[in-house]
Image (cartoon, grey):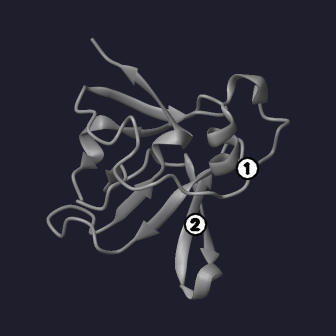
Amino acid sequence: MDTNKAVNLDKLTRDQLRVLRDKGTELPFSGALLKNDETGDYTCAACGAELFESGAKFDSGSGWPSFDQAIPGSITETADDGYGMIRTEVTCSNCGGHLGHLFDDGPKDTTGQRFCINSLSLGFVPKD
């Protein structure tokens, strides 16, 4: 994580730091934002950058918040071959915080993408 990009590490919990800095993963079905269905924007928990709009969220059944598209320019994609898998890591383009992974098994009637994101790496700003 590039801590020079308006990141206040003091406001993050130990679990958030484990995900955002050490590329950890929260347990499935444990995230506070998994079942959130309010209208608003999902932001980076580390720097506050807007990442996903609520209209892009869908229930993938995976146990993590899932989105079929990110706000343009908000996400950086990097090849990840860790743990014997080939997948795409997604990080916040603003601060570099680890968010989760991108898969190509999302809704076929939209983008076909599934951004599988840790709740711990997200904030949420409701819209009126």
Q: Residue at x 55, y 42 (%)?
A: 121
Q: Is residue 69 left or right of residue 88?
A: left
State the image quarter where residue 88 is shown.
Answer: bottom right
Helix, strand or loop status at disc 2: strand
Can residue 97 be spotted in the picture? no
Can residue 60 be spotted in the picture? yes
Badge 1 or badge 2: first in the primary sequence: 1
Q: Which mark is residue 36?
A: none
State the residue in front, 62 or 43.
Answer: 62
In the image, residue 80 sits, relative to residue 61, either above or below, namely below
Q: Amino acid at mark 1?
A: Arg
Q: Amino acid at mark 2?
A: Glu
State the image quarter where residue 15 is shown.
Answer: top right
Residue for badge 1: 21
Q: Which mark is residue 89?
A: 2
Helix, strand or loop status at disc 1: loop
In the image, residue 97 sits, relative to residue 32, either above or below, namely below
In the image, residue 88 sits, relative to residue 54, either above or below, namely below
Q: Residue furthest bottom?
A: 84
Mark 2 surroundings: few (<14), some (14-19) or many (≥20) residues within 10 A: many
Classify the position of the C terminus by image quarter.
top left
Q: Residue at x 31, y 17 (%)?
A: 127
Q: CA distance from mark 1 to mark 2?
A: 13 Å
> How many numbered tags mark residues here?
2
Mark 1 surroundings: few (<14), some (14-19) or many (≥20) residues within 10 A: some
